[in-house]
Image: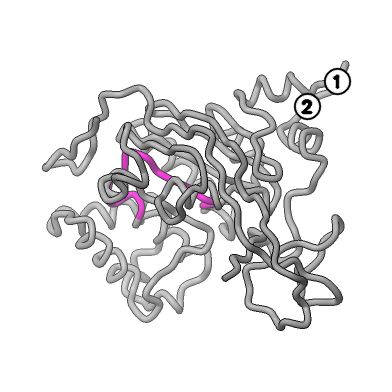
Amino acid sequence: MGYRDADTMAFSVDTDVVLECKDVSKSFTVKKLAGNGPAGAHDRRGPILSLRMLSPRWALPMERVDAVRQVDFAVKRGEIFGILGPNGSGKSTLIRLIATLLLPDKGEIRVLGLDVIKERLRVRRLINRVSVEASFFKKLSAMENLTYAARLYGIDMKRFRTSAREILERLGFPAGRLHEPMEDLSRGLQQKVAVARALLSSPVLLLLDEPTTGLDPVSKKEVQDLVLEVRGTRDTTVLLTTHDMQEAERLCDRIAIIDSGRFVALDTPGNLKRMVARDGEATTLEDVFFRLTGKGLIVPNGEEAWEVGN
């Protein structure tokens, strides 16, 4: 299993499989939008589902929709495993299931052999998550938010301040803004704080749900460099969802393509490109994505498209 080193706050892992998902499924009760509703209610493929609270006049009757369907995969120690899919395909739902924030309807998820349902508190000590909608105490500063997270994880406070500053410096976070309220920071700077917060606990499994969304090209590269560094120096395993094909190719050892809740392909970036290649034609990951899903990547409002019903 894994154990926490009292001095380094790092985990040592003596198993080759860090994450295992077997026949995992999850569905929601949802409302499908119709009419000339708010922005993002439609894309070129027709109605989508929205997370926002909407006026009943835009809502059709409730129905069950499969967000994740019979997903099977395993992630090995030290691997960076990517998941690519259009909005609403189930990427973020799968991340939340692994993070113990949702319960699967069917199947089994294990982190270092621990069942995420039966042993969720132990699992939470081994993982951390960065999401595109990271939450903070907006009136508090970046350092105050990180201090709160450090205390929550029982991190030694003397080491915390040095570690937090080192991580933020690696991410290009301006030292002079450490004590400004989060609400005064740009979306990009807030996301850097979210990445730093996740790395403070030296997780065995780092869940990155579109971690570089909203970052400029320089900041995006800084986050990517740090992910590679953390994998190399801290023996961290990474599960990454992204819409950035270059990011996926640069970071991921293997990539799964998810569409309508199912994995439609899973292999190395090189093998995926060879799988869809046509004679005499250079193939990119974007080509793989379009040919396997037949869909674009972004809907107008840029959201994952699930609304959970009552």
Looking at the image, is 268 positioned above or below residue 120? above
In the rendered image, which quarter is residue 82 located in? Answer: top right
Looking at the image, is 279 positioned above or below residue 255? above
Which of the numbered marks, if any, corresponds to residue 278?
Answer: 1
How was this image coloured?
Answer: one colour
Give the class, few, some or many, for how many residues have Cα within 10 Å of label 2's Cα (few <14, many ≥20): some
User: Given the image, on which type of amino acid does mark 2 rest?
Assistant: Thr
Percent across and percent down for residue 1 are 24, 30
Is residue 223 highlighted in magenta? Answer: no
Instruction: Kindly identify which residue carries mark 2.
Output: 283
Percent across and percent down for residue 43 are 82, 61
The structure residue drawn at horizontal position 59% and vertical position 39%, both measured from the top left corner, is 83
Percent across and percent down for residue 29 are 63, 62
- Mark 1 and mark 2 in contact? Answer it, CB < 8 Å: yes
Element marked by disc 2: loop
The structure residue drawn at horizontal position 39% and vertical position 35%, both measured from the top left corner, is 237
Looking at the image, is 72 positioned above or below residue 37? above
The answer to whether residue 294 is left or right of residue 21 is right
In the rendered image, which quarter is residue 301 located in? Answer: bottom right
The structure residue drawn at horizontal position 27% and vertical position 62%, both measured from the top left corner, is 149
The answer to whether residue 35 is left or right of residue 3 is right
The magenta-colored residue range is: 198-211
